Amino acid sequence: MADQKNELAMIKKDTVDVVSERVKKFQETGEVHFPANYSPENAMKSAWLVLQNTQDKNRKPALEVCTRDSVANALLDMVVQGLNPNKKQGYFIVYGDQLTFQRSYFGTMAVTQRVTGAKSIDAGVIYQGDEVNYEIQNGRIKNLTHKQQFNNIDKEKISGAYCTIEMADGNLYTELMTIDEIRQSWSQSPMWGKDQTQEKKGSTHDNFKQEMAKKTVINRACKKFMNSSDDGSLVMNHFHHSDDVAEEGRMREEVNQKANQEILDVEPASATPDPEPQREQVEQPKKEQQEQPRQEDQLDLTESFEEQDPPF
């Protein structure tokens, strides 16, 4: 028990403390400014408590299987974006030996309001029989109106959803999605079957269909709106980086699962074996490059360790 506590203390010193120092430097140089109600120190404490209970898919502790660099950079992504896991603004998820921080849609909304100065972000669900009108100006939705009868509300009759972002100057940005577009987004989830076209009965997407539809359109609206701002700030860099790392982890996981499901057809051994054929290499899927944080913003903890090999 004492050894485990000592090991956790060592990991904390080599990750949390290093991240805290990097964040302080960002603040001193004016590269990042946190809201008045956000404490990086408290967010790090909350994250550390969450990490001690985070496990991979094999129920092994994340702090044992993940590299220290990935732990540190996941924490850095969280703090620079001004998020706190205690407020359900994001989650730590393990892919192999890599820890990732993934925003919830609450977190995406918080970052959007912080970066763009948006006054409010609201979403609505459209049901069959609702009256929806809008105009298209320069490719953007304008003047959306939505009239709804109470009796139309039925999760089995959702026809779409929309999200409206209101800026401080009163201008509005609106994103609209049909139910087919929403389901297409849901189909990217690992819980969605290969040939599945609708949500399974009893699943989260089925039981909470309205909330899941709003979550999907909010995420799309916030990301599109922020990308259109052309903001190259440190916050935006880490906003994209956390998404990229998470997507890369999911793709690797999918490749590994497919590789494990392959059936090997082994030929019987002959008296004079043929030369061993060259093994086919599994090509890793390539991901479209997005803007990455500067190299100096990434934490490489190798030099801060007394030992080169991690103790876990």
Image (cartoon, rainbow, N blue to C red):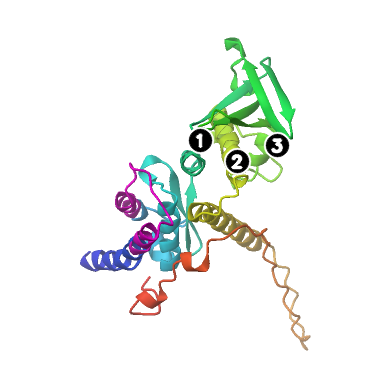
Tell me the kind of residue under disc 2.
Answer: Phe
- Give the residue pinned by disc 3: 197
Which stretch did the figure color magenta? 21-49
Nearer to me, 203 or 233: 233
Nearer to me, 82 or 243: 82
Q: Residues within 10 Å of mark 1 (few under 14, many from 20)?
A: many
- Give the residue pinned by disc 2: 225
- Residue drawn at x 48%, y 68% is 296
Q: Is 26 part of what is drawn in magenta?
A: yes
Where does the image place residue 250, in percent across and percent down from the top left? Answer: 58, 55
Tell me the kind of residue under disc 3.
Answer: Thr
Q: For this view, does 185 lie left or right of residue 110? A: right
Q: Does residue 203 appear anywhere in the picture?
A: no
Q: Secondary structure at mark 3?
A: loop
Tell me the kind of residue under disc 1.
Answer: Ala
Q: For this view, does 61 lie left or right of residue 101? A: left
Q: Quadrant of the N terminus?
A: bottom left
Q: Secondary structure at mark 1?
A: loop
Nearer to me, 117 or 66: 117
Marks 3 and 1, the one that precedes in the sequence: 1
- Residue drawn at x 61%, y 62% is 256
Where does the image place residue 184, in percent across and percent down from the top left? Answer: 68, 39
- Residue drawn at x 49%, y 44% is 115
Q: Secondary structure at mark 2?
A: helix
